[in-house]
Amino acid sequence: MKSKRILVWFRNDLRLHDNEMLVEALAKSESILPVYFFDPQYFHKTRFETLKTGIHRAKFLLESVAALRLSFQKLGGDILLVNGSPEEFMTKLVSDFEISEVYHHREVAPEETLVSTRMEDLLWKQKINLKHFIGHTLYNKEDLPFPIKDIPDVFAQFKKKTERDAMVKSCFPSPEEITFVENEDWGALPTLEDLGFEVNTEDFPPFAFTGGEDAGLLHLKELLLEGAEIHQKPVKNTGGQQGFSSRLSGWLSLGCLSPRKVYWKLKAAEAEFGGNANFNQILLGLLWRDYFRFMFKKHGISFFQEPEEFEKEFFSPTENEHPDLIKWKSGHTGNPIVDRYMHDLNVHGFISHTGRLLVATFLIHILKVHWTNGAVYFEEKLIDYAPASNWGNWANVAAAGKDSKTKNTFDLEKQIKLLETIVPDPSLMA
């Protein structure tokens, strides 16, 4: 029996393709009300004096939401944009629109999980069910060859067993027809200024990333065609060169691209053109994303080997004004490769995975600054920030994660040796 109306709460799932939540809502309702909340808590300052969301990711987010809105408008409807938190407005929406059920994608990191828990409690008081979907991973948890509690903590073991014994499901199709709840005012898309940013024309380079499902699919198509034509090994990362990077992560982090869509498009390209090292790197990146999400699902904050120290540093940071931290953030450490990467991060909101490992190594093991300071700075600056991947990678570099001693995870000696081969530039030390 169909529910009359279902509210579809979009979070980091800003797409029509391969969206099980949307497909099921359409199958079980007479009409749907898509909603996106611009939650103020994601645009405030942290206790580290960094922004929860920096200007590059905010711009990418606005573009992605605008693109989803356009997709719904082409189908004769829209998405309700709310300037406020779900805790503040959801119960009123449910009442005003006579909603029978709310669908959403559940996250795995502590802060995002807490939002779901609070909303579940609030809706339950209205006798409304909040249904959870997990649509951010390549593998569904029920398709893994082990229950969540038994997932290997060592990435190499997770990779081996998953690739051998699990299957990647096919993608859900994009809906061709949608019946929307009737609504007169769908809300305005906020500007960067509305979200609290002071915008200058030089804030964004002319070749900045563009958010949205169509932009992500186009980038994926061009990436696979380029890989098919070149058939060359990735460029070696030296002297600040970015080397090969798929640059898919921004669209993946906001759910403009489904990991399964990337996987099956890549497999089709391999079948037509043959495999290559760059394609393998994309697949490896998808597996790392899954690993970190499942680690946080399994362990929560206990993913960190010293959770008490983590909580102490996270809730009472002591190094905000550390001079070496300030130089690292601004790209004035005197190490050319580190400074080049930090400049790129600040200007573009993106650096390659190799670059992230190098600058993290330098901050933690050379400058001796606690790793949480770097993690929150990346949280502000990265377009592709995803809590599990960001905090998981930083913890591994700091030897504070569950897989800190695995060679496949992070080769500290190799990273330090590369850093030490770079001759410092005295002019950058000021």
Image: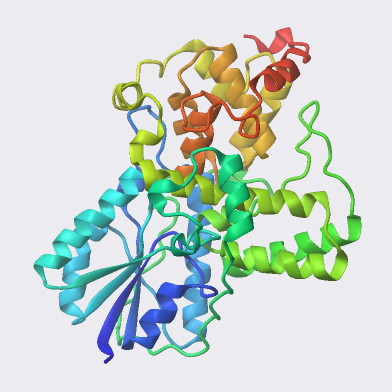
Q: Foreground residue, 278 or 411?
A: 411
Residue 183 higher or lower than 123, as above or below: below
Residue 126: x and y in percent read 11, 71
Residue 39: x and y in percent read 32, 54
Q: Foreground residue, 178 or 228?
A: 228
Residue farthest to the left, as pictured = 125
For the question of whether residue 45 can be seen, the reply is: no
Q: Foreground residue, 5 or 215?
A: 5
Residue 330: x and y in percent read 58, 24
Whether residue 152 sits left or right of residue 276 in the image: it is: left
Quarter holding residue 350? top right
Say which residue appears at 65% left-offset and 63% top-offset: 262
Say which residue appears at 72% left-offset and 7% top-offset: 426
Quarter holding residue 10? bottom left
Q: How many marks?
A: 0
Residue 258 higher or lower than 291, as above or below: below
